[in-house]
Image (tube, rainbow, N blue to C red):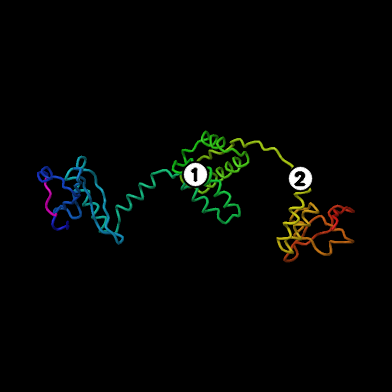
Amino acid sequence: MSKAKNKREITPLYIQKLKPKDDAFLVWDAKQGGLALSVQPTGMRSWKAIYYAGGRTRWYTIGPLSKVGLAEARKIAKTIMARVALGQDPQREKVDASRAEQPMRFGDLAARYIKAIQSRKSWKQSDYLISKHLLPRWNKRPAIEIARSDVKEMMRGITAPIVANQTLAALSAIYSWAIKEEVGGVKENPAFKIERNAISSRTRVLSDVELGKFWNAFDDAGLMTGTALKVLLLSGQRPGEISHMRYEHVIDGWWEMPGSRVKDGPEPRMRNPIMSGCRNRSAI
C-alpha cells in the first residue's frame, strides 16, 4: 500500500483496535514524520523510523510495541529524523556499532592474516594448512575464545606429526600477527609454548633402479635443466652450488668448488677457498 493511504494520526485507541491482515503492512503517523507502525500477519507490531539516505531507503527499528509506547516512539523518531536532516545515517551507524561489539570470528581473522602475507612465498602453504585443518574446526568461533586445550585437541586430530607441527606454526603466526597489528581484540596466543611433535630424522637413499628412472626422466626436462639435474644427482652437491657452476671451475675433468661466493655482477661469483690449501672436488 502507498504511504498516503495508510497515513493517520496514531492514537492509543487506534492501536488497540488495529488488527493484523494476511500481509504485513505499515501505518504511518501523521503527527511525527518518518514514524510508522509495522504490523505482521502474526500480530507482531513494532515501531520503525523510515528515511532516505545514501541512495536507499533505511529502516531503523525503534522497538516492539510491547516495550515502546506511542509517546516514546515519537520522541525517538523525532531524534532520528533530526540526525538524518544533518546528513547522518542512524541505521548504518547502528549496524556498524553492532558489528564492532561482536568479537571477530576465527575465520575472518585468518582471512585477514592471509591477505596480509600474500607477498610472502610461503603464503599458499599457510592458506592450505589453515583451510584444511583449522577453518573446519573454528571458522565461526570467536578468535579470542580459542584456548590452549582447543589447540592441543587440534594437534591430536592430525595424523601426520609433521603436518600437525606445520599447522601449529601457521596458527601461532595468525595470533602473533593479530597481537602485533591489534586486530580482533586478540591479546594472547593460544599456540604459545604448545609442544611440537617429536620428529625423527630419516635418511633416504635411492636404489640403483630408482637412479635409472630419475636419470631417464631428466632427459625430458630439457637440455639445460636436465643436464643440471644430472650433475646434481652425480655430484651430490647443493642446487645452489650447481646453479652457479662456471667453466673456469672445471679443471682437468674435475669441478673445483671455492669456499664462498661474492656478488660482483648479475650473478654470484666464487671467492677463493676459505681454507688454505683445501678444495672440494667432484668428478665431471
At mark 1, the secondary structure is helix
Q: Amino acid at mark 2?
A: Val
User: Residue 116, position in %: x, y?
Assistant: 53, 53
Q: Earlier in the sequence, mark 1 or mark 2?
A: 1
Q: Which residue is mark 2?
A: 205
Q: Is residue 207 magenta?
A: no
How many neighbours does mark 1 have within 10 angstroms: few (below 14), some (14-19), or many (20 or more)?
some
Is 156 left or right of 75, judged from the image as shown? Answer: right
Disc assigned to residue 177: none
User: Residue 77, position in %: x, y?
Assistant: 22, 51
Q: CA distance from mark 1 to mark 2?
A: 38 Å
Q: Is residue 9 magenta?
A: yes
Q: Which residue is mark 1?
A: 135
* Residue closest to the eye, 244 or 214: 214
| Span of residues in magenta | 6-11
Residue under the point 74% across and 63% down: 224
Residue under the point 26% across and 48% down: 61
Q: Amino acid at mark 1?
A: Leu
| Residue 279 in the image: above or below residue 164 | below
How many neighbours does mark 2 have within 10 angstroms: few (below 14), some (14-19), or many (20 or more)?
few
Q: Quadrant of residue 158?
A: top right
Residue under the point 70% across and 37% down: 200
* Residue closest to the eye, 276 or 212: 212
